[in-house]
Image: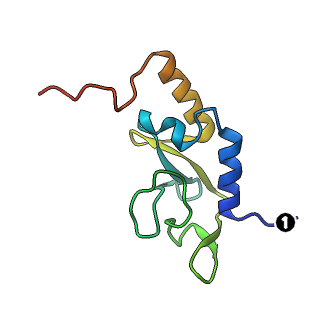
């Protein structure tokens, strides 16, 4: 069986969930942020660039060594713990891609405005 890198797995997941709300481009306006959850440690990791800045999509390059099990000589993450799942964080909660798609459908059905369309809180 051919080994799959984390980048290949993320690309496959993006193709599989395209059009469902389970990808960053489709749900970011509703407050979903790309993240990873490690079921073994129960820790959530927001997706980050290698320099630590928050990333607008799922990137393995900013994952900490504690969840990366194989890196290329240049430092690129090749494989992660099997217990690590890509999904989204919203209001402190983790959503799998499938759960984010369901939540987004519910938000849209209630005509919930996108974050950019909501009024600013009044003082």
User: Dividing the picture into quarters, in which one does residue 48 lie?
Assistant: bottom left
Q: How is the image coloured?
A: rainbow
Callout 1 secondary element:
loop
The 10 Å Cα crowd at callout 1, few under 14, some 14 to 19, many 20 or more, is few
The vertical placement of 98 against 87, above or below, is: above
Question: Residue sitting at 53 percent across and 36 percent down?
Answer: 26
**Circle 1 is placed at which residue position?**
2
Q: Residue furthest right?
A: 1
Q: Quarter holding the N terminus?
A: bottom right
Q: Position of residue 100 (x, y in %)?
A: 55, 35
The vertical placement of 10 against 3, above or below, is: above
Q: Residue furthest left?
A: 123
Q: Position of residue 47 (x, y in %)?
A: 48, 56
Question: Residue sitting at 53 percent across and 43 percent down?
Answer: 24
Q: Quarter holding the C terminus?
A: top left
User: Dividing the picture into quarters, in which one does residue 16 lie?
Assistant: top right
Q: Position of residue 75 (x, y in %)?
A: 56, 78
């Amino acid at each position: 069986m051919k080994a799959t890198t984390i980048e290949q797995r993320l690309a496959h997941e993006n193709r599989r969930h395209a059009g469902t709300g389970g990808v960053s481009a489709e749900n970011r306006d509703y407050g979903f942020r790309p993240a990873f959850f490690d079921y073994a440690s129960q820790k959530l990791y927001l997706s980050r660039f290698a320099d630590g800045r928050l990333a607008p999509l799922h990137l393995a390059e900013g994952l900490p060594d504690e969840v990366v099990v194989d890196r290329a000589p240049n430092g690129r993450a090749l494989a992660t713990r099997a217990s690590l799942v890509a999904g989204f964080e919203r209001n402190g909660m983790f959503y799998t891609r499938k759960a984010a798609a369901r939540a987004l459908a519910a938000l849209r059905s209630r005509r919930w405005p996108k974050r950019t369309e909501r009024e600013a809180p009044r003082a």
